[in-house]
Image (cartoon, rainbow, N blue to C red):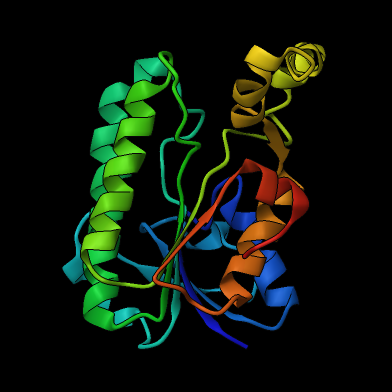
Amino acid sequence: MKTVFITGGTGYIGSRLIKKLMESGHEVIALVRKGSEQKLPSGAKAVVADPFHAESFQEFIPQGAVFVQLLGVPHPSPRKKEQFHQIDLRSVKASADAAAVAGVAHFIYLSVAMTESSIMKEFQAVRKEGETYIRSKGIPCTFVRPWYVLGPGYWWPVLLLPLYGIARLVPSWRNKAKAFGLVTIGQIVNILLKAVEAEPKALRLVEIEQIKSRHVA
């Protein structure tokens, strides 16, 4: 059993991950804003604090815990450029600061596929900066890098699946099709669980193909 401190625990991925973690016997402590405590799955311990200020929650992170950073802008799109900086980047920097002070054993960050994209380049740049900041803290870390996570309310990219199939048949498009591959909510929750349970490494990157195969190296 591990103790897991998580941000974004009331969201699309976080609420499902918390249930999976507890089903697997892990203790979950979730950082929430005031008024959101009741949105957490039953059995998770809530810490009410400001996710943008490390000092407000670092004392509640147990030494040796696994920190999972999920907090971010829902339904990211190019028009949310400012929100990426004000929410995603500020929160991951605060989390990394708090985790370093607390002495966590492992920091897991839900990042994004780092491949060339003119549409989502700002989102990718912010996540890349987040990764760099976490590494600067010297904490063993895992970066999970999906592109788009299919699930309830997030099904529209299914319409593109025939195009993905065609692109994989064309040599010059094949690598890009793989890089922008779609994963399901079940796959992402399972790979995050495996990352929590894996032995920490200085740096572990989990790319789309690994997410699909549910394999953590």
Across and down, in percent, residue 145 comes to 52, 44
**Is 169 left or right of 9, judged from the image as shown?**
right
Seen in the picture, residue 187 relative to 94 is either above or below; the reply is above
Q: Quadrant of residue 52?
A: bottom left
Seen in the picture, residue 126 relative to 1 is either above or below; the reply is above
Q: Residue at x 75, y 75 (%)?
A: 23
Whether residue 214 is visible = yes
Q: Quadrant of residue 73?
A: top left
Q: Residue at x 69, y 66 (%)?
A: 19
Whether residue 50 is visible = no
Q: Quadrant of residue 128?
A: top left
**Is 25 left or right of 118, judged from the image as shown?**
right
Q: Residue at x 71, y 44 (%)?
A: 185
Q: Report the quarter where the N terminus lies.
A: bottom right
Seen in the picture, residue 102 relative to 147 is either above or below; the reply is below
Q: Report the quarter where the C terminus lies.
A: bottom right
Across and down, in percent, residue 32 comes to 41, 60
Q: Residue at x 71, y 60 (%)?
A: 215
Across and down, in percent, residue 156 comes to 71, 18
